[in-house]
Amino acid sequence: MNSPKRNFIYILCSILTISITVASFNSSEPLQPDGIFVSYATLSIYNCNNFSMGVHCKSGDKDIGFRVVNKGGLYEYRVRIGLQKTTLFFCGFSHGKIKKGIFDLYDASRDSDRCNKCTWKAVGNGIYGYTDKPHQAVLFYKWIK
């Protein structure tokens, strides 16, 4: 025979277990190790201009930060790519007070098959992107100023 107290404890434990399970699925972190649900890409931005550039990169939920990239310098960071390939990182470029533009430097729907090490070169007329194979340059974005 089941006592009312035992039934109450059983129901309470069941509710608690369900609540913990639902909370786990709603969390922003994956339940499994990173390698199962996500991959990574490295973004490298080379400043091939004869002046320093300000570069500020971020996504909808992560701000990589602002950096001054000197002439011939490199700004590099690693991004985490979700399974649904909706990851988007964009960067704003400036030369002193002149805004050069804001461009999508990693769009998983475009870049996940294009590059794992996505190389960008900022030059006089804009930003060139390089693929992993073959290593070809394509003018992706022209400066707005």
Image (cartoon, helix red, strand yellow):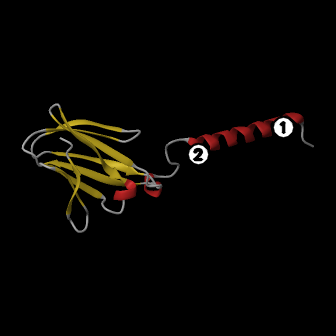
In this view, the residue farthest toward the top is: 97
For the residue labelled by badge 2, is the local secondary structure a helix, a strand or a loop? helix
Looking at the rendered image, the quarter that the N terminus falls into is: top right
x 29%, y 52%: residue: 42
**Is residue 86 toward the left or the right of residue 72 in the image?**
right
Percent across and percent down for residue 130 are: 22, 59
In the image, which is nearer the foreground, mark 1 or mark 2? Answer: 2
Amino acid type at mark 2: Phe
Quickly name the residue at label 1: 6
- Count of labels in the image: 2
**Is residue 137 toward the left or the right of residue 91 in the image?**
left
Q: Quadrant of residue 132?
A: bottom left
Percent across and percent down for residue 17 are: 68, 42
For the residue labelled by badge 1, is the local secondary structure a helix, a strand or a loop? helix
x 67%, y 39%: residue: 19
Label 1 or label 2, whichever comes before in sequence order: 1
**Is residue 90 toward the left or the right of residue 109 in the image?**
left
| Vertical order, 64 against 119 (above or below) | above
- Toward the viewer: 59 or 38? 59
Quickly name the residue at label 2: 25
How far apart are the alpha carbons under marks 1 and 2? 29 Å
Percent across and percent down for residue 26 are: 57, 42
| Vertical order, 59 against 131 (above or below) | above
- Toward the viewer: 66 or 39? 66
Amino acid type at mark 1: Arg
In this view, the residue farthest toward the bottom is: 134
In this view, the residue farthest toward the right is: 1
x 43%, y 56%: residue: 35
